[in-house]
Image: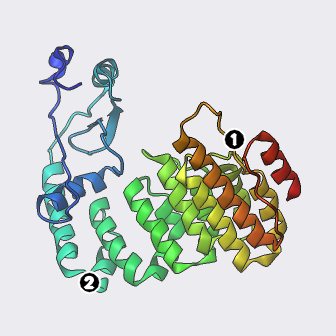
Amino acid sequence: MLPNPDLKPVYDKVVWLYVFRDFSAKGDDLKAERTSLRFGLSSYPQLFLVDPESLETIGETGREVDTFLNAVRNAHVRKARDLKALERVQQADSRAEELEKKDSVELAKKYFADEDIVVRTRALRILAEKEPGLVAAKAKDLLEIENDTFRYEVCKALKKAGDVKAARALDEVAQNPKGSRNPNVLSSEAAAALETCGDMKSIAALAPRITRGDYKNSGTRIAIDSVMGIVKRFPKAKGEAKDVLRQGFPEPCDPKESDNLRNMCEAFAKHLHDCLEDLTGKKVPFPDPYDARGRERLMKAW
């Protein structure tokens, strides 16, 4: 898209920043990662417009020439007084580099409430590994920060902490990952944390992901496994869990679909079937083939 001659009218209307990562987590990649963390990037490629002073996103360009041109036309930059963004970022990078080099819990505590999201994320990673309980204590407020990479780290820390007090905050993110550039992943991270933090009420929050029977989405399996984790801790939830899981059997693939897709669908159905057997202690033959009739029999059997 970018070399397209139709973009020439906007070439000098924006300052272009290209960020490349090799995911080596060292040298230039650490610098590039800081930019990704600042804007909550966890999927690529991404194109968007940023205010040069506030660094707020002021336009989502999409990946087409027409949508890009339209975004530039409609973007409005506030009249700058003193451009201090570069200075703020440089200072923040210095604090982030300090955390990268020292990996200190005390330093992480000091910077955990830093004004810069990159510094906070670096501090969060240290605390998530070494003091997850500190993160769990502030779960609700932390999960309201609309930055995907930051919230992923919060969810991982909560899963490690296993604190049920975080259940309602995680339920909300699992159901409504607002302000996210990658809502499916954020919702899945919250669902994964509910395996150790969720309670009986959390099953209702996970249910929509399961009952859709979307075997192509890895987040569906995550939700199933989290329901199983909740039942292990709250055995009284077995009945509700069974009702949710039995609705998750996917519609069988059309015979014209690829072997890979049909195998994926059947493997997902078998995983769900195994979970129901573990949950109930009941043995039910898995249908061969897994077709519409077999699916109907399975759902009735449970």
Q: In this picture, is 137 found above or below 186?
A: below
Q: Nearer the viewer, residue 242 or 49?
A: 242
Amino acid type for the residue under numbered disc 2 = Ser
The answer to whether 199 appears left or right of 46 in the picture is: right
Residue appearing at x 72%, y 51% in the figure: 248
Q: Secondary structure at mark 1?
A: loop
Number of labels in the image equals 2
Can the viewer see residue 116 in this picture?
Answer: no
Q: Identify residue for label 2.
A: 104
Which residue is identified by label 1? 252
Residue drawn at point x = 34 percent, y = 32 percent:
59
**Residue visible at 80% across and 60% down?**
285
Q: Position of residue 290 (x, y in %)?
A: 72, 47
Q: Secondary structure at mark 2?
A: loop
**Quadrant of the rendering where the N terminus is positioned:** top left
- Image quarter (top left, top right, bottom left or bottom right) of the C terminus: bottom right
The residue closer to the viewer here, 276 or 33, is 276
Disc 1 crowd, CA 10 A, few/some/many (<14, 14-19, 20+): some
Above or below residue 156? Residue 289 is above
Ranked by sequence position, the earlier of labels 2 and 1 is 2
Q: For this view, does 11 lie left or right of residue 210? A: left
Please state if 227 lies on the left or on the right of 22 as rendered: right
Q: Can you tell which of label 2 and label 1 is closer to the viewer? A: 1
Residue 262, x across and y down, in percent: 60, 43
Task: Please rate how many residues cluster around mark 2, counting C-alpha atoms within 10 Å: few if below 14, some from 14 to 19, many from 20.
Answer: some
Between residues 116 and 23, which one lies in front from this camera angle? 23
Residue located 65% across and 60% down the image? 271
Q: Distance of mark 2 from mark 1, alpha carbons?
A: 52 Å
Is the image coloured rainbow, by chain, by secondary structure, or in one colour?
Answer: rainbow
Q: Is residue 61 above or below residue 233?
A: above
